[in-house]
Image: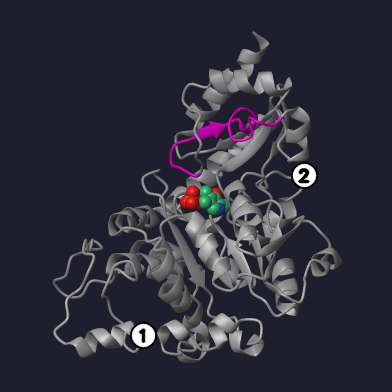
Amino acid sequence: MKKIETTCVHGGYVPKNGEPRQTPIIQSTTFKYDSSEEMAKLFDLEASGYFYSRLQNPTCDYVAAKIAQLEGGSAAMLTSSGQAANFYAVFNIATCGDHVVASSTIYGGTYNLFAVTMKKMGVEFTFVAPDCSEEELNAAFRPNTKAVFGETIANPAVNVLDIEKFAKAAHAHGVPLIVDNTFATPVNCRPIEWGADIVTHSTTKYMDGHGSAVGGAIVDSGKFDWMAHAEKFPGLCKPDDSYHGIVYAEKFGKEGAFITKATAQLMRDFGSVQSPQSAFLLNLGLESLHVRMQRHCENAQKIAEFLQSHKNVSWVTYCGLKGDKCYELGQKYLSNGSCGVLSFGVKGGRKAAEKVMDSLRLIPIETHVADARSCCLHPASATHRQMNDEELVAAGVKPELIRLSVGIENIDDLIADIKQALDALDK
Ligand SMILES: *Cc1c(COP(=O)(O)O)cnc(C)c1O
């Protein structure tokens, strides 16, 4: 296998002699065939090929193949968004009457998907603190538990998941671990190497990296033995009536069953496809992912250290800081760096945080993270503005918390901007 930097540039699409150098955008909904027999084989999953872009499209498949290589997986698919990726990854194995164990510090949109929308679909979730003991984690499992879910680096809490601890508990109960690797990206962490079975992404964030296309991806490690737990996973191990009784785990093996089923059933029925145009933009982002991640991490580390030294800052959360509660986990799982997102508290509470945000000149306020351009958000006056100060503290979002997504600009310019905004509190 090639090194990760080379895969970022060359993975996925490999042109043959005389073919386009850049990944072609196959802007076609459909594909032509000469015989009805060939078409029938595609519909029966007897042959692989393209027939309709809701199921599969070559451009999307090239980019999915690159992401599978980056994560060290056996197969991957693109989805229209990170939300769709997490929904498909879980719903592919947990349906009405099933149960899932999830880390409590996950992205708000994913929490809502699990705790509200999937609950209405009959899937129950138990949320556990990411730093819980092994005993507490094991106690969360039920006979109908079908998966465990967590984020490598949580958005926005930025705590680091102990992937090995979660994988061990999942495997002891015969279920896979699904890890959302959006913030770390495969450049900084490959969860499969630590025991994760399925990896998901909001490609909207660092993978795209330029705020240009919403998208998602699911990668299968190809390692989970569905057939060894066939009674838990009837969707993969029992005949599928909508495909003439195909048994995915038999026909496509450990390496192909999960992604084939998610494509053939969930993409077919829900249709959350990524467009070939978006996949092309995503691929441009992937070509420089390794270079950008390095700069994001260098800049964030320097800003975290600067913030720590400023008298108007009360606390900083970033796993690259010695003394951070996730420093050791960060050193273990993210030894090359974590990501560009950090959070900090300003002395003086909500009002002071608002004043700092309004004083920033280079760094704008945006509901976005993980972009080449730095941006910041004050959750208490944006995403969590309906809550009062007590409710905010209960939700783990302090009123003075500012979430900063550090971009790849010049570090001196960024620090100068943050410094003048913090100094403005003294005026
Ligand atoms: C943004 C995000 C999502 C949701 O992704 P969308 O592309 O916005 O649908 C899921 N997980 C994490 C960790 C995220 O940061």
When the figure is inspected, residue 97 is found, relative to residue 282, above or below; the finding is: below
Residue 419 x, y percent position in the rendering: 59, 22
Q: What residue is rendered at 55% in x and 81% in y?
A: 235
Q: Is residue 11 left or right of residue 235?
A: left
Residue 358 x, y percent position in the rendering: 55, 19
Residue 376 is covered by the magenta coloring: yes
Residue position for label 1: 45
Residue 347 is covered by the magenta coloring: no
Residue position for label 2: 323
Q: Is residue 397 left or right of residue 95?
A: right
Amino acid at circle 2: Gly
Residue 186 x, y percent position in the rendering: 51, 61
Tell me, for residue 260, which label it has, or none. Answer: none
Residue 354 x, y percent position in the rendering: 61, 21
Q: What residue is rendered at 61% in x and 71% in y?
A: 94
* Magenta stretch bounds: 370-387
Q: What residue is rendered at 61% in x and 47% in y?
A: 108
Indicate the quadrant where residue 283 lies.
bottom left
Q: Look at discs 2 and 1 and give the one toward the viewer.
A: 1
Mark 2 or mark 1: which comes first in sequence?
1
Q: Is residue 357 left or right of residue 251?
A: right
Indicate the quadrant where residue 51 lies.
bottom left
Residue 178 visible, this orientation = yes
